Amino acid sequence: MPWYKSGTVSVVQNSNAVIGTGTSFLSNGRVGDAFRAPDGGWYEITNIASNTAMSIAPNYQGATNAAGVYAIAPMQGYVKDSADALRALVNQFGGVLAVLGSDPTLAGVRTALVLTNADGLPEGATNKYFTDARVRAVALTGLSIPGTPAAVVAADSVLAAIGKLQSQANAQVGKGAPGFIEGLNLIWATGTSIAIRPGSAYVPSAGKVATYAGGSITPMAVGVVNTFIHLYLTDAGVIEQSTTAAPTRYYNQAHQKNNDPSRRYIGSILINTNAAGAYQFVHRLGDSSIMYTVANPESTTFRLLSSGTTAGAFNTRTVAPVTAHTLEGAWQNVGTVSVKFTPSDAGTSIAAGWMVFVPPTAIFNGRCPIAADGTITYSATGGGSANCYALGYYFDR
């Protein structure tokens, strides 16, 4: 480092004051530096008050000089102190500086610290990386819904708590609704293609409502002409075909498959033959009915009673499944006296109480309840001639 010699100094014998002219002592000298005075002697700088005033030791020994030449010489001790201080800083903060990288910009430091996103940070109890929107968009991967409802406890994870709440909700949907059913309308497209519209129904074994997304089925082969296929919604939300009927109600009008509460009954279709498939029908949800739309309802299959001239009963189960409670029929009398029809378990004499009355030589369409055993009683004695043609039925599901 070069000596500083700019300007001149005024010194007085036996005084420690040095007054400069055209000098900059503050930026070019340090306490402890050497001062070569106008007398050629060496002194130590003890204080720098301003750019033009400083003190030396010992007091100036030479002759008084108002404008003498001088020099300020930096000492090796100052360089060593600086080096020692710098070394101490490097030892203490060198590792930190290395982590901060070599790019002295905010972006550079962020890159060095992998702070462009939160990937470089360890997860902690107070770290909050997600925005509210991102938290709401997180997928519930791993969500498991318990089969048996349970209470949410403080130790549960968020996923476990949501699963328990959904299980409780599922149970609540089923509670108080064991007979619930909606939708699941049967649509005849062709004899071999039956559509089932979307819908839901309570399934007893699951204790909750199962939902079917909708689809089509091809009627299963039955092997016997004029046989019913019964359709069930399973607890897994799929449609099952079976020749096993739903003989009893499990709750009010709701039926299940015989001895199988995991199958909720939704309807039946009458099969003509395996090749022809199902007889054409219309399923009406409004009054829960199946109406046959065959070309000839006078055919053998749908003619349940032919020329009955006495008192007796006929079976409806060939065209109306066990879930049917009322027959929609064409009631005809080709005789000379009136004929009457009533369910066989009406508990009242058909002479005193009847459901359908047909005068001589008359025919009309109407309804008659079906007895629990599937029969309807008629009376045509004394000259009547009774006929019954099945047009459809009303049923429970």
Image (cartoon, rainbow, N blue to C red):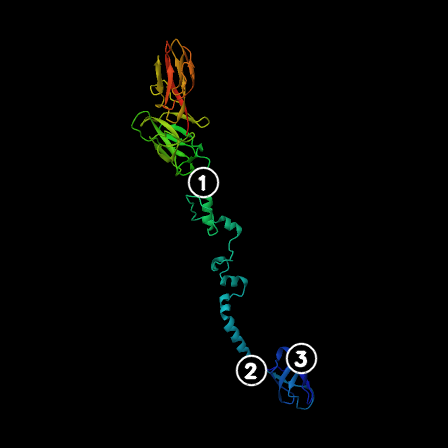
* Residue type (three-letter) at the residue carrying disc 2: Gly
Q: Secondary structure at mark 3?
A: strand
Left-right relation of 117 to 370: right
Residue 56 in the image, given as x and y percentages of width and height? 64, 85
Secondary element under disc 2, as helix, strand or loop, is helix
| Location of residue 177 (image quadrant) | top left
Please name the residue that numbered disc 1 is placed on: 171
- Judged by depth in the image, the label closer to the viewer, 3 or 1, is 1
Earlier in the chain: of badge 3 and badge 1, it is: 3
The alpha-carbon separation of the residues under discs 3 and 1 comes to: 90 Å
User: What is the CA distance from the residue labelled 3 to the residue labelled 2?
Assistant: 22 Å
Query: Taking 41 as reference, is 107 above or below it?
Result: above
In-front residue for pair 180/83? 180
* Residue type of the residue flagged with mark 3: Ala
Closest to the observer, 213 or 295: 213
Instruction: Name the quadrant of the N terminus.
Output: bottom right
The spot of residue 346 in percent (x, y) is 41, 20
What residue did someone put label 2 on?
77
In the displayed structure, would residue 133 be above or below residue 239?
below
- Distance between the alpha carbons at the discs numbered 1 and 2: 87 Å
Where residue 311 appears, as percent x and y from the top left, is 36, 14
Q: Which residue is mark 3?
A: 49
Kind of element beneath mark 1? helix
Q: Nearer the viewer, residue 81 or 254?
A: 254
- The nearer-to-camera label among 1 and 2 is 1
Q: Amino acid at mark 1?
A: Ala
Q: Badges 1 and 2: C-beta atoms under 8 Å apart?
A: no
**Residue drawn at the location 49% of the way across and 69% of the way down:** 95
Query: Badge 2, how many Cα within 10 Å: few under 14, some, many 20+?
Result: few
Q: Does residue 68 appear to the left or right of 123 in the view shown? A: right
**65 w.r.t. 147: above or below:** below
Residue 99 visible here: yes
